[in-house]
Amino acid sequence: MTYAEVLEEAKKYIGSKCKACPVCNGLACKNTIPGPGAKGSGTVAIRNFNAWQNICINMDTIYEHGTPDTSIEFFGKHFALPVFAGPVGSVNFHYGDKYDDLTYNHTLLTACAANGIVGFTGDGVNIKVMEGAAKSISANNGIGIPTIKPWNLETIKEKMELVRSGNPFAMAMDIDGAGLPFLKNMNPPAGSKSVAELKQIVEMAGRPFIIKGVMTVKGALKALEAGASAIVVSNHGGRVLDGCPATAEVLPEIVEAVKGRLKIIVDGGIRSGTDIFKALALGADAVIIARPFVTAVFGGGEEGVKVYVEKLKAELEDTMAMTGAMKISDISRDMIRL
């Protein structure tokens, strides 16, 4: 399949809310929730995308010729690209009934592992989602990152015990999901977490723990204090708070404050290999891409994911070749223009 064919096939199955656009920029779905859009005015997803497009790349082809190496080491694992597939929950509710959370997660994780990257799994009120995630991660030799919502501590402990059976090499929490209504209505209530509570959660995980949903220097330093191994600079695709800045806008100041003391991943509107390059040049260690992987799965299953990963890799290799970066660690701030 070609990527164009994946998109065309996706349109048959992905439901009426996502348009499987050639460029997933948030315009066609805007404030469509349920669906892939952003909250309120629906402009944050668009702002995320546009912020990356406003960064230019400095071309330089005067260097000793070589072949770019896009691979990275992350928490002791080797990956072909500095790209993770993001967690998506309530798949059939937001995108269509061809997949539910269990079948989507399994397809995504299997395809990601086969193509040298790693997928995050989503979470939900149905405990079978975490049971299924554990089985899929186990089937892929631990190459998968379960993402747990900021439930109350009792529920977090229960879900961690479930996914631990899959022996994931890392775990995550999307702390930016704190405002979701189904968390607020829990008894005892769930949602935001103190540094002390996050310390407990990190200790419970017993492996590298990633806190997703950090948008300020203050938040990054609190995650560091809690013992996180990595953070994801993320505004949840604009789905939890209208009026947020773009992730590209806050990434540099967070990188500067953290000073390499934990890994930094960034998401939000990253859609191409050139976007990945820009994020790394701003100081990120890796990126997360979510919605286009949904389109890839709906449009071609495991083959759709393979096609999209190959597209990203080719674009990143080309950008590196046109800037003189022969390996990921060569990518630097002077290779872009803000």
Image (cartoon, grey):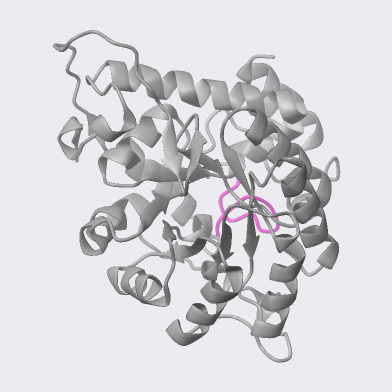
Q: Quadrant of residue 244?
A: bottom left
Q: Position of residue 47 (x, y in %)?
A: 40, 50
Q: Position of residue 285 (x, y in %)?
A: 36, 45
Q: Position of residue 78 (x, y in %)?
A: 49, 36
In the image, residue 134 above or below residue 149: above
Say if the magenta span includes residue 7. Answer: no
* Residue 181 seen: yes
**Residue at 53% over, 70% down:** 175
In the image, residue 291 above or below residue 127: above
Left or right of residue 174: residue 295 = right
Q: What is the span of residues highlighted in magenta in the rendered image?
A: 29-38
Total numbered labels: 0
Q: What secondary structure is the magenta-colored segment mainly?
A: loop
In the image, residue 71 above or below residue 282: above
Left or right of residue 67: residue 287 = right
Q: Position of residue 108 (x, y in %)?
A: 70, 39
**Residue at 59% over, 41% down:** 118
Q: Quadrant of the N terminus?
A: top right
